[in-house]
Image (tube, helix red, strand yellow):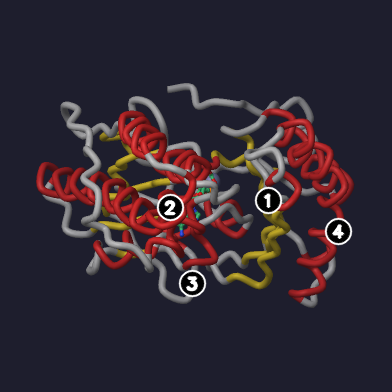
Amino acid sequence: MILGLETSCDETAAALVTADGRILANVVSSQADLHARYGGVVPEIASRRHLELVVPVVREALAEAGASLAEVDRVAVTQGPGLIGALLVGLSAAKALAWALRLPLVPVDHLHGHVASLFLGPDPVEPPFLCLLASGGHTLLLDVRDHSGYRVLGTTLDDAAGEAFDKGARLLGLGYPGGAAIDRLAREGDPEAYDFPVARVPGLDFSFSGLKTALLYRVRELSPDELSRRRADLAASYQRAIVRALVGRTEAAAEETGAERVAVVGGVAANSELRASLAGAALAPLELCTDNAAMIASAALYVEEIPFARYLAVDAYASSAA
Ligand code: KG4
Ligand code: ZN
């Protein structure tokens, strides 16, 4: 049994996963409410909250699984990328637990974790596949040939897709985090009401910053009254543009690589329009799209463990080496 911990951003999460990829417990404590009044994640507040929550979420995961610490065989934890202070809380907690129990530690890359959300039961997706990873921090097209890694085919040149959702929501006065709020409001609006540009950058890369600026201009043109009348149309049109960009590039990548299977992971994979537009693709289950620790434990099944006592100097990293 693997105990996974995830604290890279504003979710404090612990999970227990079996060696064959079955989820025994998956506890996520979101700090979103705490950060909403600031319109985004405040790193120092996130670190402090992780510190308060990390032990309770581990306890809750054990209770949910009806298991004890004595049954844990390995401890997995997100090493990066993410907010460095937030990561250090999870990494320190994981080291302490592994050390106290004399267990091996498995440091996991957060992006590998998102991909590994597809490897969990009851319906695991087997490589090879082309993977769209769209989250608050990343927008990547990945060539996944086996369980242990991937090759990057395309990335965003500026904002991530989730960031575009969050910034758009802020411009529309929908608060933080914005992706789910735009998703909900878009259902009441007309996606053809506004024509937002989908950036055309070369290759398989993405660009979302122009889109956000286009929305800003549209919002500025409207009086507060008009804005409240057109908010749903703006949300629907804006979402349509992001989804079009994601689907367009994913289809181009599938054609270019001859991939037979396409999969979608990350927080933005929870978007209902994206899910509907990629019918036929393997979609991570909703509860595994946004940050969680089950995906970290899942990735750990395919990463070399560090034996007891050799991991105390392992450090977290804020951004990927690439
Ligand atoms: O993967 P994730 O939980 O954290 C990161 O690793 O970044 O992704 C969070 C992102 C946020 O930007 C959030 O607005 C977006 O995922 N998100 C959504 C939806 N649910 C979450 N975006 C669009 N539609 C949704 N339903
Ligand atoms: Zn994430």
Of badges 3 and 1, the one in the foreground is 1
Q: Label 2, label 4: how many angstroms apart (C-alpha)?
A: 28 Å
- Dot 2 or dot 1: first in sequence order is 1
Q: Is residue 82 left or right of residue 285?
A: right
Q: Amino acid at mark 2?
A: Val
Q: Label 2, label 1: how many angstroms apart (C-alpha)?
A: 16 Å
The residue where tag 3 is placed is 121
The residue where tag 2 is placed is 268
Quadrant housing residue 62: bottom right
Quadrant housing residue 318: top right
The residue where tag 1 is placed is 32
- Dot 2 or dot 3: first in sequence order is 3
For the residues labelled 2 and 1, say whether their Cβ atoms are less than 8 Å apart. Answer: no
- Dot 2 or dot 4: first in sequence order is 4
Position in image of residue 123 (x %, y %): 41, 74
Position in image of residue 95 (x %, y %): 79, 40
Q: Is residue 200 left or right of residue 223?
A: left
The residue where tag 4 is placed is 56
Q: Amino acid at mark 3?
A: Gly
Label 2 within 8 A of ligand 1 by Cβ:
yes
